[in-house]
Amino acid sequence: MGVELTGKTLGLIGAGNIGSIVADRAKGLRMKVIAFDPYLSVERAADLGIEKVELNDLLARADFITLHTPLTSETRNIISADAINLMKKGARIINCARGGLIDENALKVALDSGHLAGAALDVFEEEPAKTNVLFGNEKVVATPHLGASTSEAQENVALQVAEQISDYLLTGAITNALNMPSISAEEAQKVRPWISLAEKLGAFAGQLTDTSLTSVEILYEGVAGALNTRALTQAALAGLLKPALAHVNMVNAPIVAKERGIKVSETRRDRHGIYEGFIKITVTLADGTTRRVAGTVFSDGRPRLIQIKDINMDAEFAPHMLYVINEDKPGFIGRLGTLLGDAKANIASFALGRSAEGADAIALVEVDGGVPENVVAEIRKLPLVKQAKALAF
């Protein structure tokens, strides 16, 4: 005796392009569809007519589980012995994505014990799969990784590559990338200025960092927290690491950070202050000191600095900037301006901030054409100056 699909719950692990197509087919069979995908937004889930859940909830509720994720360090053995123990007795599992997503030995134990009713596999941890612990099991349907072995599929994959590259170049949309989060054309319009902000904030902190990093904490507040923060974090890390490592880019930045033992964490929270949304990056150095910088995107789409070292500021990013920390005493701004004038450095804008009267103050100066290092060295010699650095964006 078999079982019907109608009325059953299908659990999708991964709700990207293929996962969403499977969801559409399942709804046609009147199945209830739930999905675990860290990068699936609530709005996208609503558009698909599915329910977004956490992994443990999916394992406990689903009658059928199907996997649609790439194989990464995070997804390897996502269906482990512990995960299988959370699944319903009599559940069935399907994997046509990548071998290695399922612990095959644990699956065999679950099938032999009767905890799971069946499995269908098109992919295996070792391929070509000449032998496997699951072969010969009457509860297993096995096919030799032939899901895309049709003439139509081979033609369509070539068309999809061209279409996806075209979409990225024209709209910024990213689809089916293994090392970048998927971003729809609509999302790209919203997220692009925030990606620019994240990269510039990272670059700001990175250019002021002369020692090794131990951790990076990124706070996303308000509208920033509702965006695809994986893309924002990759941009921030790229900006942070590039001053020291020229080969770093948005794709490889998380891997480079991990290789160097840099702990990266994200926090999202609802809007609290006057800004609709902002990003704050906190960098901890090997000596225990921290650097903080925050920014937002105004309605004109331009990224702006709003806080440095917990000191409120309001400044646009510019190609060439001078960053100065000094004691807040009368006469300093005049001396700084005179020195820049004598060096024929033209000031385009000048932003100031301080923690308290007489305490540390920050000057952020946009200078046409940049400030030569010998001039920066002279600025460091000025009375009251604690730090001076030329920045480029």
Image (spheres, rainbow, N blue to C red):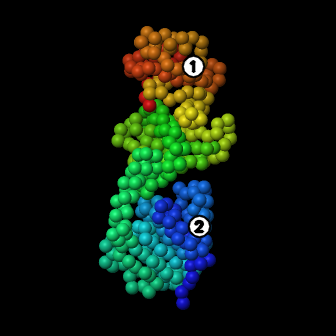
Q: Which mark is residue 17?
A: none
SS of the residue under disc 1: strand
Q: Residue at x 58, y 69 (%)?
A: 33
SS of the residue under disc 2: strand
The amino acid type, in three-letter code, at marker 1 is Glu
Q: Residue at x 48, y 61 (%)?
A: 17
Check the picture and name the quadrant holding the N terminus: bottom right
Describe residue 6's horizontal placement relative to residue 174 as left or right. Answer: right
The amino acid type, in three-letter code, at marker 2 is Ile
**Rendering quarter of residue 344:** top left
| Viewer-proximal residue among 366 and 177 | 177
Q: First in sequence, mark 1 or 2: give its number.
A: 2
Q: Which residue is mark 2?
A: 34
User: Would you place residue 382 above or below residue 147 in this image?
Assistant: above
**Residue 6 screen position, x and y as percent:** 59, 78
Q: Residue at x 59, y 18 (%)?
A: 328
User: Would you place residue 230 above or below residue 87 in this image?
Assistant: above
Q: Residue at x 60, y 64 (%)?
A: 49
**Local crowd size for mark 1, using a 10 Å CA cut-off: few (<14), some (14–19), many (≥20):** some
In front of the other: label 1 or label 2? 2
**Residue 148 screen position, x and y as percent:** 37, 69
| Viewer-proximal residue among 159 and 124 | 159
Q: Is residue 354 visible?
A: yes
| Viewer-proximal residue among 345 and 297 | 297
